Amino acid sequence: MIDRFKRKINYLRVSVTDRCNLRCVYCMPEQGVELINHKEILTFEEIVEIVRTGVEMGIDKVRLTGGEPLVRRGIVSLVRMLSEINGIKDLAMTTNGVFLDKYAESLAKAGLHRVNISLDTLDPEKFRQITRVGNVQDVIRGIEAAKTAGLIPVKINCVIKKSPQEEDALQVANYCKENDLQVRYIKEMDLEDGIFSKVIGGEGGHCAVCNRLRLTANGKIKPCLFDDLEFDVRELGIKEAYLKAVGQKPRSGTENKINKFSNIGG
């Protein structure tokens, strides 16, 4: 699939749930957010059919996101179903890592290739403040489990205020260097105000070469994270939703007034 600006669209990010076990300060308010009705959430069968159609149209890279994907019941089964689709070259997951100690081996056996894990600080108290409820040691154990299971390269997503030279970012960088992990720095973003930047050490946020679409947990294909455009696969049909998303993918992001990071997967 090629969009109006000659970008090859081959990457689909799939939000499997809008639910999360953490309450990170830059993602959602302390009381949480209004959740999508369970009846609206895509079934595994629907997700597989949407992904399969996308692969037939040129998608070869798929990433599972949330919310937190590991809180979706039966997530290992979904990974297995997706891994059986011929044509997917890269099947990955972005996770906060809290449950990876439990799931890493099963995910790898089911066909998941690799993971990105969120880690903004190694300081237990700061981690608790950022996530409101989290224990950084759970994430550390998850990282080790991912490495042991062969979900490599393990990439670490570190949210920063302004610079990778910040104290916590430097500590995360040193930890990654010592543990054979790859680190990417993501400046805090704001969907409503359209505040975003290129990911340092990654490809995200670089509009000129953006190759991705996003599937929300309730079945909307979005051509851009920072745009209100979305196309409902249930209303339009899967192929038509893809074609409209690619056909109307903007040159660059602006702002998104209808989604939250908690329900679109970043």
Image (cartoon, grey):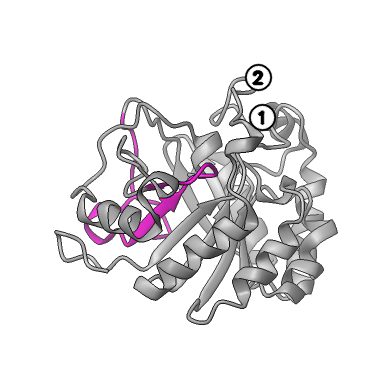
Give the quadrant of residue 25: top right
Q: Residue furthest bottom?
A: 86
Q: Residue at x 67, y 47 (%)?
A: 96
Which quadrant does the N terminus fall into?
bottom left
- On the picture, is 258 further left or further right than 251? right
Please give the count of numbered marks on the rendered protein. Answer: 2
Residue at figure coordinates x 53%, y 61% from the top left: 63
Residue 117's tag is none
Instruction: Give the residue number, with chain letter if any, for mark 2.
Output: 30
N-terminal of the pair, mark 2 or mark 1, is: 1
* Any part of residue 56 in sight: yes
Q: Is residue 203 above or below residue 71?
A: below
Choose top left, top right, bottom left or bottom right for residue 68: top right
Does the magenta run of residues contain 242? no
Identify the amino acid type marked 1. Answer: Arg
Q: Main secondary structure of the magenta part?
A: loop
Residue 174 visible? The answer is: no
Nearest the camera: 264 or 48?
A: 48
- Of the residues shown, which amino acid type is indicated by label 2? Glu
Tell me where residue 262 appears, x and y as whole percent. 55, 35
Secondary structure at numbered mark 1: loop
Above or below residue 14? Residue 144 is: below
**Disc 2, disc 1: CB below 8 Å?**
yes
In three-dimensional space, the C-alpha distance between marks 2 and 1, rounded to whole angstroms, equals 6 Å
Mark 1 is surrounded, within 10 Å at the Cα level, by few (under 14), some (14 to 19) or many (20 or more) other residues, namely many
In percent of width and height, residue 153 lies at: 60, 72
The residue wearing badge 1 is 23
- Which segment did they paint magenta? 194-221
> Which residue is more in the foreground, 93 or 204?
93
